[in-house]
Image (cartoon, coloured by chain):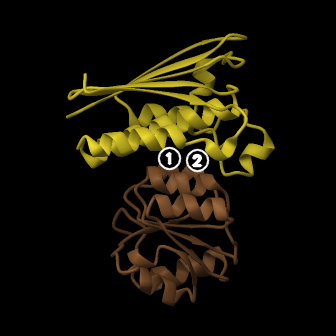
Chain colours: A brown, B yellow
Amino acid sequence: MKISEIKSILNADLICGEEYLEKEVFTACGSDMMSDVLAYVKEQAVLLSGLVNPQVVRTAEMMDMKCIVFVRGKQPDTDIIDLAKEREIVLLRTSYEMFTSCGLLYKNGLKGGCGL
Amino acid sequence: MLLSLHYDVSGTDFTCAGEASGKIKKALKELGFPASLIRNVAIAVYEGEINMVIHGGGGVIDAEISPECVSVVLADQGPGIPDISLAMQEGYSTAPDNVRQLGFGAGMGLPNIKKYTDEMIIESEVGKGTTIRLKVFVK
């Protein structure tokens, strides 16, 4: 799935990273707990989170993720956006809640990793 | 030795936590190390850096990069860890609520460093500080 399709499925606003919207991603994870993302996530390219702070971007950076979707309409501040731009990570914002966002992406073919 | 890197980590600015880990990750990428090794080092150092800010009052990170191995030493002069085996248990955390609200403090930091490295040694003395030495070998 292209990141642009995630944007469309979640009716999301693009915050930054327009030049990377055509990148392909295959897996995603949803969490507000960055410790768990670092501990359990493998090879996922998209992070959905309702947490808004610079450590969300840094966690995605360490995990080689390409895109962060802020759920529940959460808006990151300019420091967070600048950090994501430097790290070439796409930021999207959707008004859907976490459960709905994950469900819509899963239904449309994005997987959770480990073949599931 | 290909490269030695040194970083000071602030003990007060949580927003900057991860800056050193990001720079080490970038250096390894530029040197052409395999992506899996880079990610393992990045996650382990990031966890250590976060710990340093949450618990250690800041500190220093020194990385030595050779063609065979990436060695990193993270040292703080914080309160120290009274019971290291307890601190190594998954889920055990002494992080305050404000840190949990930032998405950390699940008690996965030290276990995660062990998981992503080939060698991990913790030396800690109560009242003096904690030093973590980790190694990831190029396979």
Find residue B56 and name its label: none
Q: Chain of mark 2?
A: A
**Dots 2, 1 in contact, CB < 8 A:** yes
Q: Nearer the viewer, residue B53 or A106?
A: B53
Identify which residue, A5 or A112, lies in the foreground.
A5
Q: Is any atom of residue B112 visible in this view?
A: no
The residue depicted at 73 percent of the width and 44 percent of the height is B99
What is the total number of numbered labels drawn onto the structure image? 2
Callout 1: SS: helix
Q: Is residue B135 left or right of residue B97?
A: left
Q: Taking A2 as reference, is A106 left or right?
A: right
Please name the amino acid that badge 1 sits on: Ala
**Residue, disc 1:** A39
Please tell me whether residue B138 is drawn above or below residue B75 in the rendered image.
below
Q: Position of residue A14 (x, y in %)?
A: 55, 80
Please name the residue shown 67% across and 83% down the image. A95
Q: Circle 2 is placed at which residue position?
A: A35
Q: Residue at x 70, y 11 (%)?
A: B126
Left or right: residue A109 compared with residue A56: left
Q: Position of residue A73 (x, y in %)?
A: 69, 78
Q: Residues within 10 Å of mark 2 (few under 14, many from 20)?
A: many
